[in-house]
Amino acid sequence: DAGITQSPRHKVTETGTPVTLRCHQTENHRYMYWYRQDPGHGLRLIHYSYGVKDTDKGEVSDGYSVSRSKTEDFLLTLESATSSQTSVYFCAISPGTEYEKLFFGSGTQLSVL
Amino acid sequence: GNSVTQMEGPVTLSEEAFLTINCTYTATGYPSLFWYVQYPGEGLQLLLKATKADDKGSNKGFEATYRKETTSFHLEKGSVQVSDSAVYFCALTTNNNDMRFGAGTRLTVKP
């Protein structure tokens, strides 16, 4: 299995609080992605990174920010969590743009009350 | 824009039954098509892919054929097993940083 670790695995928080999710990889892959998974929507891309300090927005980026200060870590921050951000969040990595080499972490279940 | 529509579940089958999960797509350009599988408590794993029209992707007894004329990429398996119980996602990309997923179809196989 590709070395991807997401933390925390589960989190419950209150509306209006900041939340940071962490994705850590040991594969030295260039690309890292954050997706959210919701019933009826499948996975939707939030943000992605194509290198240290190089990030770009995805399909559903509003209310989220990201940072990548090291190759191995990609952080997703909800500055002020809302109930609509209750979801399962998946990190994914790939060495380049070949999607057959896209590997997913095990996910973070976030509940915003 | 690009999008994927797959049949709603859940799908419940008996062991050794034939499986079809329908997937159709809308895309500009020439997409690559994928099926991913998600087992309970895990992330998605690539099951199979096809990168051009008439290609057939296959893996672990699953198959899907890229049909440009019907914009479809249906997943099939001739004889399902209990261990195939999972959620299956159809996906496409035309731009390698914009993978679009379907909503997922939950499959339960009963002994």
Image (tube, coloured by chain):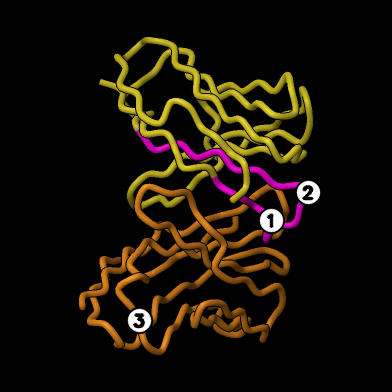
Chain colours: A yellow, B orange
- Cα–Cα span, label 3 and label 2: 34 Å
- Cα–Cα span, label 1 and label 3: 26 Å
Q: Secondary structure at mark 2?
A: loop
Mark 1: which amino acid? Lys
Q: Secondary structure at mark 1?
A: helix
Total of numbered circles in the picture?
A: 3
- Residue at 57% x, 62% y is B46
Please provide the residue range marked out in magenta.
A87-104
Question: Badge 1 is on which residue?
Answer: A101
- Residue at 53% x, 82% y is B63
On screen, residue B76 versus residue A82, left or right, reads right
Asked if disc 1 and disc 3 are in contact, CB closer than 8 Å, the reply is: no
Neighbour tally class for label 3: few under 14, some 14-19, many 20 plus, Cα within 10 Å: many
- Of label 2 and label 1, which has the lower sequence position? 2
Mark 3: which amino acid? Val
Image quadrant assignment for residue A24: top right
Neighbour tally class for label 2: few under 14, some 14-19, many 20 plus, Cα within 10 Å: some
Asked if disc 2 and disc 1 are in contact, CB closer than 8 Å, the reply is: yes
